Amino acid sequence: MSVPSDSAPPPDLATYERQAFGRYFAFDLHFPLAPVILLTLVCAWLMHGRVANGLIAAWLGFSAVANLAREAFMWHTRPRLETHQRHGLILTVYTWSSLASGLTWGAFAWLYLDPAQPLTQLVVGSIVAGLVGVSVTPLSIHLPAFYTFVLPMLASYIVLMLRVGGAEQFTLAGMAVVYLGAMANYAHATHRVHRETIRLRFENQRLIGDLTQRKAEAENAARIKGLFLAGVSHDLKQPVRAISLYTGFLHRSDLQAMGEARLRDTVRKIDAAAGAIHSQISRLLELSRLESGAAPVHLGELDLTEQLHRMVELAGPDAQARGIELAVRTGPALHLTTDVRMLDSIVQNLLGNALKHAQATRVLVAVRRRRTGLRIEVRDNGQGIAPERLPQLFEAYRSFDDRHAGGDSHGLGLAIVRAQAGYLGAHITVRSAPGRGSVFALEGLG
């Protein structure tokens, strides 16, 4: 039995079953058109002379239309099955087609059987029993198709036997009911076997998909770890090397002849390099605490409007020095209970990235109310971010290539921001496009 491709397992078992059943009827079940045509012609010959020619012609026409319509539909649908997801439609059409075939053979029993001639009872009973028997295996995949085929045939035969009312006829009717029960039981057993096979295949595909995803995640984690370690070593080695060079310079120099001004300048550079090391290590420790779940959360109440205005005011000189218009839009006072330190860190990181890396002329900090809580936005009209870089923004040392930007930026800011947002019960979103600026938002506060 055909099953859906391993490459894209559906989200649930019911969908997977429907796809498997649809593919079975579309590709695996080859309708025995030639034997059916032969049997139909034989039955029409048997009815000749016993049934009016008009009824025989109508019976033949209905049978031909039903079978040809089904085959035409299947021929048209097979090439489009996967792209248009018509698995459910195939099951519906095949169920109605089975009903049409069942009614066709039920009509034959009704037209041909003559209670006064036992031979017709034997012929009808043999044909009906044979058709029911051969239909169990192919149609039990989809039980509605099985029942819509067998019930009209057996119902006609049973009703005809009961109408005659003789002992033999009652016996044949009873045997038909027992036969129907046996075939139905076999059909249900076969159906359960098919469903169990599909369920196992579905679970295997889910496991394969899960393993593939975990493998990809592990490979990505290893890649990120390598990049992270390379970035850490780069950012630590630069100031360490600078300190080594400056101290070596001092060792080799005549300090008395150097002069106080030059000595102070060299010491200042050593202090700056040591500060860069301290900043890097502090941010690494902060990220480690956040990702391990060990960072403490201290809740407190604050006026969000006042807090944002204060942070924007502190960033004002930096924005002015860069020629960036910095604005804030918050509305009336908004009181919030949260970790003030983490909230400040998040907004400062987002605001700092907008001022340093966006190459913008205007940056706006705004607060909006949403059904999920408050939303703090940091908007800029800068160069924007390419779509392929968006998934990497919050990875350590992948947020921006800011190790060349100077200062104490180490590519850890947005990684810390994402982790801190989780502690506050919120999350970070970003919307950006090249040439259209970016919108970083902290959502779900409250």
Image (spheres, rainbow, N blue to C red):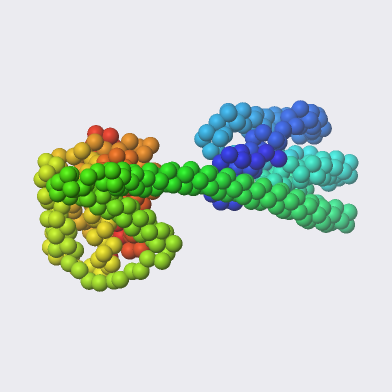
Which quarter of the rendering shows the C terminus? bottom left
Which of the 4 image quadrants contains residue 330? Answer: bottom left
Q: Tell me, yes or no, if residue 173 can be seen here.
A: no
Q: Nearer the viewer, residue 223 or 118?
A: 223
Residue 4 image point, x, y percent: 62, 40
Q: Nearer the viewer, residue 361 or 189?
A: 361
Whether 96 is drawn above or below 185: the answer is above
User: Residue at the location (30% across, 71% down)?
Assistant: 298
User: 359 left or right of 121?
Assistant: left
User: Residue at the location (80% across, 44% down)?
Assistant: 133
Residue 378 image point, x, y percent: 22, 50
User: 217 left or right of 137?
Assistant: left
Whether 142 is drawn above or below 308: the answer is above
Q: Nearer the viewer, residue 102 or 380?
A: 380
Which quarter of the rendering shows the N terminus? top right
Q: How many marks?
A: 0
User: Residue at the location (22% across, 50% down)?
Assistant: 267
Q: Nearer the viewer, residue 21 or 212?
A: 212
User: 278 left or right of 188?
Assistant: left
